[in-house]
Structure formats: C-alpha cells, structure tokens
Image (cartoon, rainbow, N blue to C red):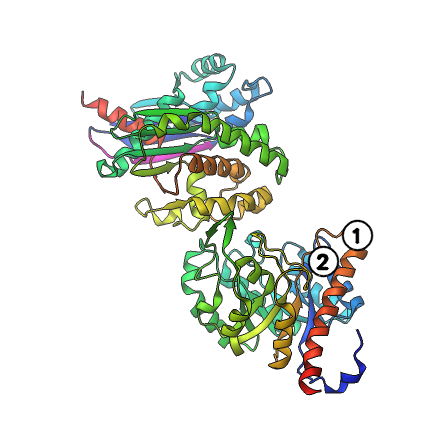
C-alpha cells in the first residue's frame, strides 16, 4: 500500500511492523525471515521454541544478515510446550532471552506471566522482572494472557494474574488475540497500560475459548482503533503480527494472509498520522 | 517386626517395608519400585505374554531380595487389576509361585476400593464425615463411598489409565476421534454406576488417591510432592476441564515436560484425565482433595489392625 502524499508527514517514531516467526508455523523460523523480507516487514520477532534454529543465536544472526531483516524482539520460551527450551529454570530462560536480545540488537523481550504451578517463580515474578529490567536497556514486556475456559467455566492458569495490569511492571505487551479469548475490554486494558505499553502483538479473535490469533480485521477486536491509538500517542515500541496460519492450504495462501495483515497494520498506523496532521 | 508389602500393580511393582506394631503409622521405612506396566503387556487375547511373566518373575525376585536385605520378617504380596483380569491369571500366579515362592494374593476390584477407602478414612479421620474416594490405577478406576471405615458402596471399573491408553489411544498425540470415542466410553461406564452412590446423598468430603490424580492436581497449581505429605492439595473440576483438551493435543514428550508429570506416566495422562473429568462430572464433584495414602497403606493398616488380635 502506497500513500505517497503523506510520506513526509509520517513521524520517524512510527512503529515498526514485525512478523512473529510463530506466524508461519508449521513452517520454520528460517522461512519466517524469508517471508518477512519478501513481504516488506520491518523486522521479525523470534519465537523461541522447539525449532532448534529459534534457540540458536548464531543461526538467527546469520538469517537476519542474509535476509536483511532485523530482529526487533525475542519471545522468551514460556509456552506450555517449551518447558525445557534453553533451561527448565524460568529465570534462566529470561536471562538467556535478554542475552539473545542484546546480541541480536532486539529492543524487547516478550514474557508471559508464570503458570500457576510455577509457585516460587510466580511469587517472585513481579519483583524479579523489575530487577532484570533494571540491569539492561532491553524491555521486558509482560504480556496479557487469558483464563482457560471450558464451556462457561474459567480456570486461572496464570499467576499472579492473566490480566497483567493488575500488577506493576515497567513494560507491557498487549496481545489482541488474548484480549479476545479473555473477553476483556481491550481499549480499557490499553488505557490501564498507558505509557507502560511497550510492545504489541497484533492479531484478532472472536472470543472463543481457543486463543485464535486471526488475521487482524477478521475477528471482533478493535484492531484499527488500537493501531490508530498507537499512531496518535507516538507509541515507541513495535507492532508484531502474531497470527495463526496453520490452516493455510498452501504457501501462497499463508503469504497472502501475512501480506493482508501487514497492509491492514500499515494502513491504520498511517491513516491516523495523516488524519492527525492533515 | 518389619513387614513387607509387595504390590503388583498395573503400572509398577512396589515393595514397602514398614516397622509394624499394633497402632503404628503405615509409613514406609523403605520403598523399592520397578516400572513394569503390566496393563500394557496384555496381548490381544488379554493374556500376559511369556516375556511379561518373565519380567514379573524377575522383578518379584528382586523385591524379595530387597525385602530380605531390609530385614523383613513377614511379606504381604498382593496383585491388582492387571493380574486379576489377565486371561492367564492362574498360569501367571503359578509361575510366580514356582519360581519365587511368593503366593500373590489377588485382590478383587471391590477389595481394592475398600482398602483404599480405609486408608483415606484413616488419613482424614472421622471429622471428614461421609467420604467419597476415587482412585485411578493403571488397570482400573475404584470408587468407594461411606461414613464408616468400611464403605457402604465400593465399585471397580475397568477404566485404568494404562489399560485405556494401550487399548484405545494409539496415536501420539492421540487422534481427536479416538479421544472423543474414549470420552464417550468412559462416561457410559461411569454413568451406569452413578446410582449406586447417589442414593446415599451427597458426600461431605471427596478425596482422590493415585498418581494420576496427584499429577492432575499438580498441573492445576497444587504444591509439589517435595513439599511433603501434610500440605493440602486440591483438584478443581474447572481446572481439569480446561486441561483435558490441552493434554490431548500435546505429545507424550511435551506432557513429560509438565510439572509433576513423570516420563513413564506422561503417555497415559490423557486417558487418566478423561476418566478423572468424567468421574467428577458424573458424580457432581466440583473440587476434591488429594489423599497421599491409598491401597498399599490400606493393606498395611488392615494387617496392623489384625496384629493385635
């Protein structure tokens, strides 16, 4: 999407739009770099998970250099399926994520709140994240999650809370698939995060019990409003497309989805910049 | 006097050594364990194959040696559902007798449920009122209910986690259709017996024993086993319901990475969770408490009771 008339008016603080390497799953981390370059993303967020390349800083650096796509963020391995990636100790995972971010020039580490069974980690989490954040320029952006749901029941899987705005962190990540799954008021959460919002996972959702990660615009989340808010408030973090393309029938279909997500994002980031100034 | 209890279960063969005197706590002075997975060694006809019996004999022999080493004077050897339901149970028992001298006593499902109930009653005491006790073993599910030390109703169903996994959940991760079919089967089996318990009215306290329940409680946020026996551990139905689809979509390897899930049990956790969820749902249980004592403690308690007489 070209908007030549407004090019000079877009402030240089306009957020960069990155592709999460998780967005190409089941394709590999390497493929994500390739697609990000081809589609014109400003960078990638590396999801550190079972793909060995995602855990290997040297390999990531080579991919970034080869495709000329910067790594803007590192997502620490705190998923259910990455209990053993890098370390079984959750603090060690965060230290390694920080080291990876520093070495790769990424500004942000995305962190999930602890699972409830990680009792000691959960007790020390808020304080520990502050301590870690104080030791580096890298942002530890703690991500909003959601209660696990079965029919009309809810189970609290995260501690201290899936709603990270109930605790005090220096930086937050807002994820619009998670707000959908949580059936929470997204704009209110955005408001609570205020200037502590450091990072955005852009996706969409319809509020089902599954964390859907739809292409923005295909669910019920106020994706456009959020992007316009970011542009208006001169958000200085990154916007990362984290969508699920698992069901794409072909590589072409996956790329079309990722191109659409990028176009949607750029459009809504730019339209407000233009409207605000024009 | 030292008493040895040899438990030939569907997953493990377990030797407990207790310092026994009338009124003693049934706590082991020593414990010796071998993973045998008898429930999965059943062949197509439901018989334990030659290799399985060979391994059982070897493990029993090893346990006998361990018992002797620890100064055990009296041994109580018993077997549960895997041997009980093996088509060639007589042959298996005869071979164990001939080759090791151990006369395995086969507990019926109902006895299993009754002894587990006794252990849970002694653990929680009379203040617990009407107790409902659930136990998911490798071969069977035991349910018992009552207000005394002897339950008013005790049932054993062939819904053990190991047996169901071996027979009905071949894939890794299991195929969604298999999971759905198993869910239906489990619910139908349990629903048939619900009336046996519901006519006594609601229980005052619901407790669960077994490794399956302990693991499910742990992933739901209960304290680690390292925190000891005396920490209260709870399992909520809402936690279980949220976990079941997640567990079912994970591979064995991924499940083994969950807290408290041992590598050797990770494969059967999906079946165990489906049984636990169905039992809680159909019996109307919102929340239950984990009881660290179960069948083995029940066997010990009963034999300690009998020592005095």
Q: Chain of mark 1?
A: A
Question: Does B17 appear in magenta?
Answer: no
The residue under the point 40% across, 37% down is: B284
Q: Report the side of B19 relative to B237 (left or right).
A: left
Q: Position of residue B2 (x, y in %)?
A: 27, 28
Q: Secondary structure at mark 2?
A: helix
Quadrant of the rendered image containing residue B8: top left
Q: Report the side of A212 relative to B151 (left or right).
A: right
Q: A13 above or below B135?
A: below
| Front: mark 1 or 2 | 1
The residue under the point 69% across, 87% down is: A277
Q: Secondary structure at mark 1?
A: loop
Quadrant of the rendered image containing residue B50: top right
- Label ID, residue A24: 2
Sort mark 2 into few (<14), some (14-19) or many (20+) by Cα contacts within 10 Å: many
Q: Chain of mark 2?
A: A
Q: B208 above or below A134?
A: above
The residue under the point 45% across, 61% down is: A161
Q: Point out the stretch of residues depicted in magenta.
A: B23-34
Q: Position of residue B121 (x, y in %)?
A: 27, 33
């Amino acid at each position: 999407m070209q908007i030549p008339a407004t090019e000079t008016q877009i402030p240089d603080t306009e957020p960069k739009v990155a592709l999460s390497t998780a967005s190409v799953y089941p394709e590999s981390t390497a493929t994500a770099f390739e697609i990000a370059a081809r589609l014109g993303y400003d960078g990638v967020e590396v999801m550190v998970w079972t793909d060995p390349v995602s855990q290997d800083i040297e390999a990531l650096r080579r991919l970034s250099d080869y495709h000329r796509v910067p790594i803007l963020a590192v997502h620490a391995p705190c998923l259910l399926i990455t209990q053993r990636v890098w370390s079984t100790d959750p603090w060690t995972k965060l230290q390694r994520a920080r080291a990876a971010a520093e070495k790769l020039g990424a500004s942000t580490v995305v962190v999930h709140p602890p699972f409830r069974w990680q009792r000691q980690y959960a007790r020390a989490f808020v304080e520990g994240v502050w301590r870690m954040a104080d030791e580096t320029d890298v942002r530890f952006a703690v991500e909003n999650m959601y209660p696990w749901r079965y029919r009309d029941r809810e189970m609290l899987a995260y501690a201290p809370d899936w709603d990270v705005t109930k605790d005090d962190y220096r930086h937050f990540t807002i994820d619009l698939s998670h707000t959908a799954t949580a059936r929470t008021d997204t704009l209110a959460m955005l408001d609570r995060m205020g200037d502590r919002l450091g990072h955005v996972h852009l996706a969409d959702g319809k509020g089902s019990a599954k964390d859907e990660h739809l292409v923005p615009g295909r669910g019920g989340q106020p994706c456009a409003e959020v992007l316009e808010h970011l542009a208006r408030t001169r958000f200085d973090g990154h916007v990362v497309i984290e969508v699920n393309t698992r069901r794409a029938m072909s590589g072409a279909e996956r790329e079309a989805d990722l191109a659409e997500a990028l176009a949607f994002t750029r459009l809504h980031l730019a339209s407000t910049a233009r409207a605000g100034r024009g | 006097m030292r008493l040895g209890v040899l438990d030939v279960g569907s997953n493990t063969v377990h030797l407990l050594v207790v310092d026994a005197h009338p009124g003693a706590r049934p706590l082991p002075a020593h414990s010796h364990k071998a993973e045998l997975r008898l429930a999965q060694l059943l062949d197509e006809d439901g018989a334990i194959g030659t290799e399985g019996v060979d391994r059982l004999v070897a493990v029993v022999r090893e346990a006998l040696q361990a018992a002797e080493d620890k100064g055990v004077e009296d041994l109580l050897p018993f077997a549960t559902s895997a041997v009980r339901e093996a088509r060639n149970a007589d042959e298996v028992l005869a071979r164990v007798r001939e080759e090791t001298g151990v006369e395995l006593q086969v507990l019926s499902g109902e006895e299993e449920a009754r002894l587990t109930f006794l252990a849970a009653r002694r653990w929680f005491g009379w203040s617990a009122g009407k107790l409902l006790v659930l136990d998911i073993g490798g071969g069977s599910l035991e349910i018992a209910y009552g207000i005394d030390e002897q339950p008013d109703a005790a049932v054993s169903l062939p819904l053990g986690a190991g047996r169901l996994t071996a027979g009905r959940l071949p894939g890794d991760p299991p195929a969604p259709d298999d999971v759905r079919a198993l869910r239906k089967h489990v619910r139908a089996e349990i629903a048939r017996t619900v009336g046996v318990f519901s006519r006594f009215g609601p229980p005052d306290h619901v407790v669960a024993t077994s490794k399956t329940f302990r693991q499910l409680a742990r992933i739901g946020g209960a304290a680690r086993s390292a925190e000891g026996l005396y920490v209260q551990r709870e399992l909520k139905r809402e936690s279980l319901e949220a976990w079941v689809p997640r567990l079912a979509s994970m591979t064995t390897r991924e499940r083994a990475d969950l807290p408290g899930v041992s590598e050797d049990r990770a494969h059967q956790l999906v079946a165990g969770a489906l049984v636990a969820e169905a039992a809680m749902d159909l019996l109307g249980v919102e929340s239950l408490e984990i009881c660290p004592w179960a069948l083995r403690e029940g066997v010990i308690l009963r034999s300690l009771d009998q020592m005095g007489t």
